[in-house]
Image: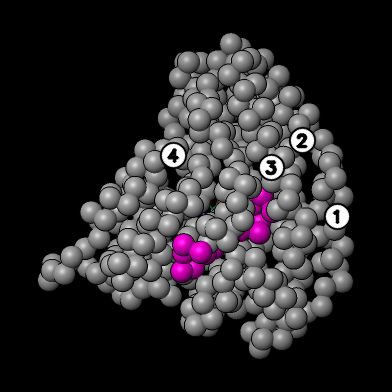
Amino acid sequence: MKNAYADPYYDAHDTIDLRSDTVTRPSAAMRQAMASAAVGDDVYGEDPTVAELEAKAARLVGKEAALFVSSGTMGNQVAIMTHTRRGDEVIVDSQAHIFIYEVGAPAVLSSVQLHPVESGTPPHGLYDPSRLARAIRTENVHYPPTALICLENTHNRYGGAVVSVETMSRVYELAKENGIAVHLDGARIFNAAAASGRPVTDFTQFADSVMFCLSKGLAAPVGSILAGSSDFIRRARKNRKILGGGWRQAGILAVAGLVALDTMIARLPEDHTNARELAEGLNTHTCLWVDMDWVQTNIVVAHTDRCGVPAEEASRRLAQAGVLANATGPDTLRLVTHKDVTAQDVVEAVARIARVFPN
Ligand SMILES: Cc1ncc(COP(=O)(O)O)c(C=O)c1O
C-alpha cells in the first residue's frame, strides 16, 4: 500500500514484506535529490555532499567527526580495526550482530578475538556491567588484552530491545576504569531514542565511536555512518581505504542520507506503533504468540510453537499467503515494521496470518 514516503518508481505489489527494515525503498524526495546532487572525488576530499553528510551526522550524534561508509558491517569493522591492535580481544554480547552476522570479520580483517558474553536477560537486563566486568582480562602472560567493548542498541536478535542510557553509562564507566574503548553498534540507535523519548546524544555520549545505518528504518538506499573523535575518524578513514571503501562521486548516495536524516527520524514512532498493533493482532487472532514486553521498537519476535510448526515452515507458508517474515530460530519468526508498511498493511498482514495460523 502506498504512503507519503513511497518509492515512485516501484510498483507496489500485494506482498507485505516484514523481513527487515533493510527492504525499505528510497522516497521520491531522495530520488529527486540524488538526480541533482553536487559531487566530487571523495578520496581527494572533494565531494561536498559527502562532506555535508559527515558533518551533519557527526553533529547529530554529538561527535567531532564522522565517516560515510557503505554498510553497517563496514562501519563496525572499520571501528574494530581502528580501536584495536592485532591479538587484542573484543567483548560482545553472545547474540550481537558483530558476532553472529558479520562473517567472522574481526578475525579476518583485524586479527582480533571476539569474547562473546551472555550479558544479561533480555529484554531489559542486557549488558549487566557485573557480567561484562568478569570478561575483562587481567594482566597475565596467557591472556589477550581486552581493548574494546561493543554494545548494540537497539538489539537486533533481542527483538529490537532498547539498552537504557543508564546501562550504557554504567558500561562506559566500567570500560574507562579499565582503559577500554566502547563502540556502539547503533544500526537502529534512532529507534532507541524514539522509543525512550530521549535525545540520541544521551545514548551516544557513552560510546567512543558509534555506527548507525542510513539504510534501515531511515530508508536511504545505501550507507551507514561511523562517528567519533577527529583523530579516531582520521585513522578510520585510512582503514576504510584499506578495505577498498574509498568513495569517488558518492555525493549521489550521501544526499539520500541527508534526506533520510531530515525526513525519516521523526516518523520512526509510527513504525513502533505499527509493531505493537501487529504483535497485539497476532496474540489475538493467531496461534503465533508474542511476549509484549519485548515489543519496544519496530521488531516483533513471534513464537510458532503453539501452532506446532517450525519457524522455517511457518515462514514458507506465510510467504505463500503474501506475508514475508524471517525465521530467526527453531520456533521464532521476526517481523519488522518500516516506512513501506502502513497501519492498513498491518491489519491486512494479521488477517492473512490468521487465515494460515488461526487461533
Ligand atoms: C544491529 C545491526 N548491526 C549491523 C548491521 C549491519 O548492517 P549492514 O547490513 O548495512 O551491513 C545490521 C543489519 O541488519 C544490524 O541489524
Residue furthest to the left: 141
**Which quadrant of the frame does ligand 1 lie within?**
bottom right
Query: Under tag 1, what secondary structure?
Result: helix
Q: Earlier in the sequence, mark 4 or mark 3?
A: 4
Q: Earlier in the sequence, mark 4 or mark 1?
A: 1
Residue furthest to the bottom: 44
Between the C-alphas of marks 4 and 1, the distance is 38 Å
Q: Nearer the viewer, mark 2 or mark 3?
A: 3
Q: Which residues are magenta?
A: 205-218
Tell me if label 4 and label 3 are in contact, CB under 8 Å. no
Residue 158 coordinates in the image, percent (x, y): 46, 40
Between the C-alphas of marks 2 and 4, the distance is 28 Å
Q: Nearer the viewer, mark 3 or mark 1?
A: 3
Q: Which mark is residue 124?
A: 4
**Is residue 22 left or right of 261 when viewed as pictured?**
left
Ligand 1 within 8 Å of disc 2? The answer is no
Query: Under tag 4, what secondary structure?
Result: loop
